[in-house]
Amino acid sequence: QVQLVESGGGSVQPGGSLRLSCEVSGYSWTRYVTRYCVGWFRQAPGKEREGVATIYSMNSVTTYADSVKGRFTISLDRPKNTVYLQMNNVKPEDTAVYYCTAQRARQEDRQERSCPVGVYNYYGQGTQVTVSA
């Protein structure tokens, strides 16, 4: 069983910053899974889910959606099993529920030594981010 718990959401003005956190837990995951992809996706009202950012556990290589490149930064604290999303210069279109997501690295991820953004096998309950003046 894998649990992901997000925190840090809230309301922020355009141009402001916010940092989301996600702790990944579960006996088997934290002790035996070393090669994994972990990241964030979001879903705005009436829109499809959108992969935002991801990081590969083995080398911390990051991948971002074009919509957030240069503004968002994902990072991983492996000893704490916690992934962060630093959101800078936020825009109203960043308003959405943000979900933390994770899965074991697939063969193609291990070969590429990176992970694609997207929705993985495990994800949390989400945290709301609202950007408005």
Image (spheres, grey):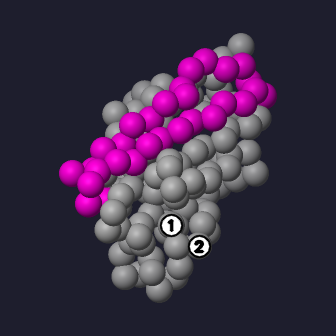
Question: Which disc number belongs to residue 36?
Answer: none
**Considering depth in this image, is 2 or 102 the residue closer to the camera?**
2
Question: Percent position (x, y) of residue 102?
Answer: 38, 56
Task: Tell me if residue 96 can be seen.
Answer: yes
Residue at (39, 37) in percent of width and height: 5
Residue stretch rendered in magenta on the structure: 1-29
Work out whether 122 lies above or below 62. Answer: above
Q: What residue occupies the far top of the structure in this picture?
A: 133
Q: Residue furthest left?
A: 1
The residue that disc 2 covers is 59
Residue 84 percent location from the top left of the image: 58, 45
Gap between marks 1 and 2, in whole Å? Answer: 6 Å
Whether residue 51 is visible:
no
Q: Which residue is mark 1?
A: 57
Tell me, yes or no, whether the highlighted magenta stretch contains residue 83.
no
Position of residue 30 measured from the top left corner of the image (x, y, whole percent): 36, 58
Secondary structure of residue under mark 2 = loop
Q: Residue furthest bottom?
A: 111
Q: Is residue 69 left or right of residue 21?
A: right
Instruction: Tell me: 34 left or right of 83.
Output: left
